[in-house]
Amino acid sequence: MAAAALLEIAGCYAVWVWWRLGGSALWLAPGLVSLAGFAWLLALGPAQFAGRAYAAYGGVYVTASLLWLWAVEGQRPAPADLAGAALCLAGAATILVAAR
């Protein structure tokens, strides 16, 4: 799930750089490859549990987005950001563990 989150964020970031920052259209090529990789990785889960896997993925995505904010954009997450990410991960864990 972490690799899927990284690919999704990187792909969306590439489109954002092209569209919002006026970057070269060449940003779109790795962005599209990254988004395709994200979709492929997320689709690897068992079909009968796809909805649950996607719901749990949300917690991973929120946390990965804050790590991206810090590592790529150079902005340290605020304490409230970290608390929110912890709540999302707790929710994801609840979805995964309670379902068994």
Image (cartoon, rainbow, N blue to C red):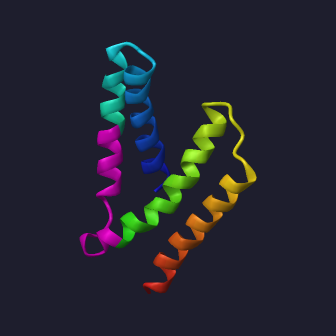
Q: In this view, does 7 lie above or below 22?
A: below
State left or right for residue 94 relative to residue 52: right
Residue 90, percent across and down? 59, 71
Could you say which is closer to the camera, residue 1 or residue 85? 85
Q: Does residue 36 show up magenta in the picture? A: yes
Residue 97, percent across and down? 51, 81
Residue 6, percent across and down? 48, 43
Residue range (magenta): 35-51
Residue at far right of view = 79
Callout count: 0
At horizontal 31% and vertical 33% (from top left) the residue drawn is 33
Q: In this view, does 58 lie above or below 100?
A: above
At horizontal 42% and vertical 41% (from top left) the residue drawn is 7
Which quadrant would residue 16 be assigned to in this image? top left
Which quadrant would residue 32 be assigned to in this image? top left
At horizontal 29% and vertical 41% (from top left) the residue drawn is 36
Q: In this view, does 77 lie above or below 25?
A: below
Could you say which is closer to the camera, residue 69 or residue 45? 69
Could you say which is closer to the camera, residue 50 or residue 73? 73
Q: Does residue 49 show up magenta in the picture? A: yes
Quarter of the picture holding the C terminus: bottom left
Residue 41, percent across and down? 35, 52
Q: Main secondary structure of the magenta part?
A: helix
State left or right for residue 63 relative to residue 38: right
At horizontal 45% and vertical 67% (from top left) the residue drawn is 56
Residue at far left of view = 47
State left or right for residue 38 relative to residue 5: left
